[in-house]
């Protein structure tokens, strides 16, 4: 299993660190690009909508939701 990669992200003006597998970082960057957002803006949206859920879990689920919403060939 891939090791977690930790990155610092600015959320609401405060630096926080987020640890995800490299594949999830790449997928989040793809989602942000698809939506015309920066990675920080996407993670901020996820953060605001996550409720009591952990941020890393919310990011993983956002990637999954994005993939499931894509039209299938």
Image: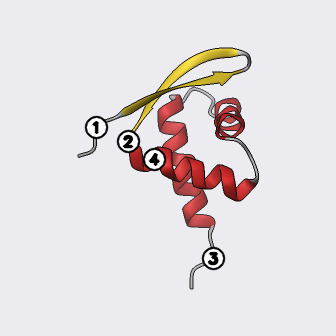
Q: CA distance from mark 1 to mark 4?
A: 11 Å
Q: Residue at x 76, y 52 (%)?
A: 36
Rendered position, 65 above or below 39 = below
Residue in the image at 54% along x and 38% along y: 58
Q: Which residue is mark 2?
A: 21
In space, the residues marked 1 and 2 are separated at their CA atoms by 6 Å
**Mark 3 vs mark 4, CA separation in Å:** 20 Å
Q: Nearer the N terminus, badge 1 or badge 3?
A: 1
The residue identified by callout 4 is 24
**Of the residues tagged 3 and 2, which is closer to the observer?**
2
User: Badge 1 is on which residue?
Assistant: 3
Q: Secondary structure at mark 2?
A: loop
Q: Which residue bears the numbered disc 3?
A: 71
Marks 4/2: CA distance?
5 Å
Q: Tell me where residue 56 appears, x and y as whole percent.
A: 48, 33
Mark 1 in CB contact with mark 2 (< 8 angstroms): yes
Callout 4 secondary element: helix
Q: Is residue 40 left or right of residue 67?
A: right
**Are the residues flagged by discs 4 and 2 in contact, CB closer than 8 Å?**
yes
Q: In the rendered view, would you say 60 is above or below 48?
A: below
Q: Residue at x 62, y 33 (%)?
A: 50
Alpha-carbon neighbours of circle 1 within 10 Å: few (<14), some, or many (≥20)? few
Instruction: Give me the residue at 70% from left, 30% from top.
Output: 48
Q: Element at badge 1?
A: loop
Q: CA distance from mark 3 to mark 2?
A: 25 Å
Q: Which of the two discs, 1 and 4, labels the residue nearer the N terminus?
A: 1
- Give the position of the C terminus as an image quadrant: bottom right
């Amino acid at each position: 299993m891939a090791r977690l990669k930790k990155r610092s992200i600015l959320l609401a003006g405060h630096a926080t660190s987020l640890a995800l597998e490299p594949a999830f970082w790449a997928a989040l960057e793809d989602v942000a690009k698809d939506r015309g957002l920066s990675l920080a803006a996407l993670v901020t949206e996820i953060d605001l909508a996550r409720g009591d859920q952990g941020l890393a879990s919310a990011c993983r689920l956002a990637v999954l939701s994005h993939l499931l919403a894509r039209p299938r060939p």
